[in-house]
Image (spheres, rainbow, N blue to C red):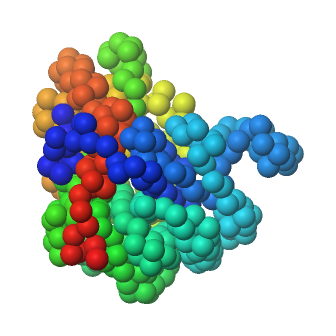
Amino acid sequence: MPTVAPRAVIDSTSAKPRPGAKVVLSHPGTGPFVQHAARALQEAGLLAAYVTSFHYDRNSALGKFLRSAMGLVRSDAELQLSRRAITEVPLELVHSHPTPEIIRMAAVKGMDPITTDRVWEVTEKWFDRIVADRHVPGADAVYGYEHACLATFEAAKRQGARCIYEMPITHHATTADYLQEEFARFPSAQGARDVHLRRLAGRRNLRKDRELELSDMVVCNSSFTRESLVRAGIAKEKIIMVPLGAPAVWSGDEKRSAGPFVFLSAGTQSVRKGVHYLLDAWRRLGPWHDMELWLVGEMALPPELVADLPGTVVMRRSLPRPELFELYRRAGALVFPSLCEGFGMVITEAMSQGLPVITTANTAGPDFIEHGRSGFLVPIRDADRLAETMRWCFEHPGQMEEVSRAAKRAAARWQWSDYRAGLGRAVLDFLQQPKTTLER
């Protein structure tokens, strides 16, 4: 079972928040990790409000209007909107400010990636100011996320409330180190958007550093992220590590269906995810009889790195979640050679569906995977080792069935309910402690 930092679980099962304690959680999105964090606070009796931008409520006037409007141009309007539905928290606890996000979604349609990024930053700060002005007053604590809560934390500090900061990704210094080295190795991999992001990094990182400075408790989701925070000089006593949970485990047969052995890469196909090393390994893997490579997610690699791939390579920009999980169940292995990852939810998603995972130590992999038993850990930037591991998976179907079963057992030991219990206990324990000199 994944481990958590001691403060996350120490003798706090009977802990109670001080009377009337109220925690406001804010995030402009509605991803599973945010919804389960909000639910963890609710189950601990702490959640005063989950503040977000746009969420889809099919019975609301806005939901009906958007469904009707999108239905004029898309046959899958309901499916697309449902990606923004909130399912883990009672809607009476959800406070929505959809204007910034709706403007962003409308404005970026057809825009280039650099303009899209600029619009994202404007709307993110706009959302942060709304939370600070309308939802912080009266809160005992606020729970925010990187780059989206500076104004919120500043308002909280003015009224003496505590600030809890979740880091779903590694510290920016660690990310920059890996990317800088990678672009030095592969100059052609750096696109215009990468140059743009590096140009703005100084200003944006100052904002993130200030948020960390104001935080009283920092939550991260993997050992690798925790190490990046410690290297950046964040006080160890401020940090807790609670791994994200795995989805419900598939109860079906682990035997892979007949057909080609599918090596799956799911998520943004980028340099940071190490996808160019996967493509290198694929080229070394031949002959490519009875195997396919599927790249599912936005392609962020330059065309020259993707050109002239041998064998059968299937590229899909995205898949609806049910289709992605079906692909997890019929693929042979998930390949996720990320250079630098805060967690990597595709790891636990795949394991929960019985799909063996090949990943690196720079992810949540070591927190879930026992190498050679429930999955495989390979060094970063090592296309030879990656190809060797992929070939072993292809050539040993019997052993892979046992790896599949072990992956499901590992996922079953740390579900979303375990994550919520761990996070809820951690926040309860934190709010019971007297304020330290770090907080004053």
Q: Residue at 47% across / 48% down in the picture? A: 47
Relative to 127, is 12 on the left or the right?
A: left
Q: Estimate the x, y position of residue 177 in percent, counting from the top left.
A: 24, 75
Asked if residue 231 is positioned above or below residue 39 in the image, the reply reads: below
Q: Residue at 34% across / 75% down in the picture? A: 214
Asked if residue 207 is positioned above or below residue 166 in the image, the reply reads: below
**Residue 141 occupies which quadrant of the picture?**
bottom left
Q: Estimate the x, y position of residue 55 in percent, counting from the top left.
A: 65, 49
Q: Nearer the viewer, residue 396 or 33?
A: 33
Relative to 429, is 188 on the left or the right?
A: right
Instruction: For the N terminus, give its image quadrant.
Output: top left
Q: Estimate the x, y position of residue 46 in percent, counting from the top left.
A: 43, 47
**Residue 430 occupies which quadrant of the picture?**
bottom left
Q: Nearer the viewer, residue 216 or 400?
A: 216
**Residue 205 occupies which quadrant of the picture?**
bottom left
Relative to 89, is 103 on the left or the right?
A: right
The residue positioned farthest toward the top in the image shown: 253
Q: Nearer the viewer, residue 329 or 50?
A: 50
Q: Nearer the viewer, residue 344 or 46?
A: 46
**Residue 203 is at least partly visible in this image:** yes
Q: Residue at 54% across / 68% down in the picture? A: 137
Q: Residue at 43% across / 61% down in the picture? A: 140
Instruction: For the C terminus, give its image quadrant.
Output: bottom left
Q: Estimate the x, y position of residue 231 in percent, counting from the top left.
A: 16, 72
Asked if residue 386 is positioned above or below residue 170 in the image, the reply reads: above
Image label count:
0
